[in-house]
Amino acid sequence: MKNIITMLAGVCILLLVSCSKTGDTGPAGPAGTANVMYSNWVDTNPWMHSSTSVGAGKKTYYFDLTAQQVTQAIIDGGTVLVYMKFVSDPDGAGIAKMLPSIYYNIGGADTQYRFQYGLFVNKIRVICDIIPGGSPANNNKIRYIVIPGGVPGARMASYDYKKMSYEEVCKLLQVPL
């Protein structure tokens, strides 16, 4: 019995020592951001008054952005990030903020602009609820970034896009500012 155990231990040691890290190098994997798509900055013009999203003490407008990259596969398994540059944001004119976002009229809390978005195949609808009323600026700018579900690392929990600045997301995904 002792000889069998010694022999098995010797075989295990021999197998471990004989393993080599040399060999053929496999093909390079795809770049992590090769399939990321993004739009140019576009003016939010024209805003349309909503007849379906109504309520006391608010006005609702929407802006439809054609987005051929937003397919059913992207909606089901990818990520779409939507950013808006506000023309007169109290945090700085032209600052890019991820939607959803609340914008206060010139820093005051008397008028709130609540921006959000919805996805349709080939279209992103940006929605603006204004409390108590008003209309959104036509020269705010909007941009989207589409990350397909098959992009390695793009949907990893270690990337919380909501906690990242626009510049950090662009650097991570290699999107031009």
Image: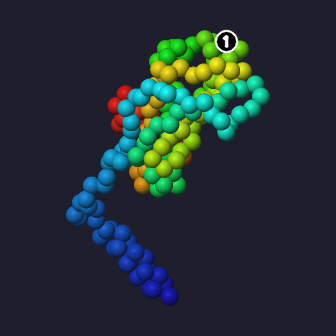
The one of 35 and 106 positioned closer to us in this rendering: 106
Tell me if residue 170 can be seen: yes
Among all residues in the image, which is located at the extreme right? 56
Coloration of the structure image: rainbow
Tell me if residue 162 can be seen: no
Q: State the residue position of label 1.
A: 108
| Residue 15 position by quadrant | bottom left
Answer few, some or many: residues within 10 Å of disc 1's Cα (few below 14, many 20 plus, some between 14 and 19). few
Instruction: Tell me which residue sits at (47%, 26%) in the image.
Output: 45
Q: Is residue 9 above or below residue 150?
A: below
Q: Is residue 12 left or right of residue 48?
A: left
Among all residues in the image, which is located at the extreme left? 24
Residue 87 is situated, as x and y percent measured from the top left of the image, at 49, 17
Quarter of the picture containing the C terminus is: top left
In the structure shown, which secondary structural element does the residue marked by tag 1 occupy?
Answer: loop
Instruction: Tell me which residue sits at (23%, 64%) in the image.
Output: 23
Instruction: Tell me which residue sits at (50%, 37%) in the image.
Output: 64
Q: How many marks?
A: 1
Residue 161 is situated, as x and y percent measured from the top left of the image, at 52, 37
The one of 147 and 121 positioned closer to us in this rendering: 121
Q: Is residue 23 above or below residue 136?
A: below
Instruction: Tell me which residue sits at (22%, 63%) in the image.
Output: 24
Q: Amino acid at mark 1?
A: Gly
Residue 121 is situated, as x and y percent measured from the top left of the image, at 48, 50
The one of 142 and 51 positioned closer to us in this rendering: 51
Residue 102 is situated, as x and y percent measured from the top left of the image, at 63, 25
| Residue 60 position by quadrant | top right
